[in-house]
Image (cartoon, rainbow, N blue to C red):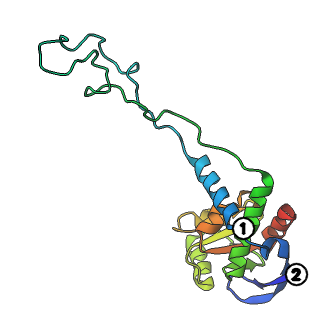
Amino acid sequence: MAKADLLNIKAEKIGEIEIKDEIFNCDVKPHLIHDVIKMQLANRRQGTASTKTRKEVKGSGKKPYRQKGTGRARQGSYKSPLMVGGGVVFGPHPRDYSYNLPKKVKKSALRSALTIRFTDSQMKVLDKLELNEISTKSFNGILKDMNLTKPLFVIANKDEIIEKSARNIPYIKILRVEGLNVYDIIRHEQLILTLDSLRKIEEVLAP
C-alpha cells in the first residue's frame, strides 16, 4: 500500500497513513478522463439556443412584389430565408445534450484523476478541517499556511461553517464526497482530502 502524510490545518505533519494503491496509485487512463470530462461538460449545457424557421416567423404570406418586370430576383414570401427578418435554415433548436457513461468507466476515470494528483504530490490529507465560526479570514489563513493556490477541498459530510467560510474566496471549491468528480479534480491544482472523506472515497471506489 502507498503511504501519505497526515497533516493538520497548519500544514504540520502529525503522522502517516496507508492509502489503497488501486485507487490512488493505479494505471492512469487519460482517454477515460477525457471521455468523462466531455460528458460532464455536455450534461451542463442548457441547450436553449433557438431560431425561427420560415413557418414560425410572424408576418404576411403575401408575395413581396410581382414575379416579372422588376429586374429583381423572384420572391414568394417575406418569410423566406433570403429576406431580411425571414426564417433561418438549419438553425439551432432547443435540445438535450446530456448523455451517460457506464459506472465502471466513471469510477475508473475518477481513480485515474486521483492517482494523477497523488503521484504529482498535489494531494494532501488533513486529520480534520474545522473552524469554530464562519470566517473567511480564518479560512484564508489555512490556505496561506498550506501554501495553496487553487485547491479543491473534499469533506465527508455537510459542514455549513466550512462551506460558507470558503464561498467568497476565488478559485476555491468545497465538495462533499458524493459530489467528487473528475472535472473538478483536474481543474483545480491541489486536492485536499480530510481523513474521513478519504476513507469514504476508498469505500465507494474500491474495485
Does 26 sit above or below residue 102?
Answer: below
Q: Residue sitting at 28 percent across and 15 percent down?
A: 76
User: On the image, numbered disc 1 is attached to which residue?
Assistant: 29
Q: Where, by quadrant of the figure, is residue 4 drawn?
A: bottom right
Q: Amino acid at mark 2?
A: Met
User: On the image, numbered disc 2 is attached to which residue?
Assistant: 1
Q: Position of residue 196 (x, y in %)?
A: 81, 70
The crowding category of the residue bearing disc 2, from other C-alpha atoms within 10 Å (few below 14, some 14 to 19, many at least 20), is few
Q: Secondary structure at mark 2?
A: loop
**Observer-nearest of 193 and 2:** 2
Q: Is residue 64 visible?
A: yes
Q: Residue sitting at 73 percent across and 64 percent down?
A: 110
Quadrant location of the C terminus?
bottom right
Of the residues under marks 2 and 1, which one precedes in the sequence? Answer: 2
Q: Residue sitting at 37 percent across and 22 percent down?
A: 54
Does 95 sit above or below residue 170?
Answer: above
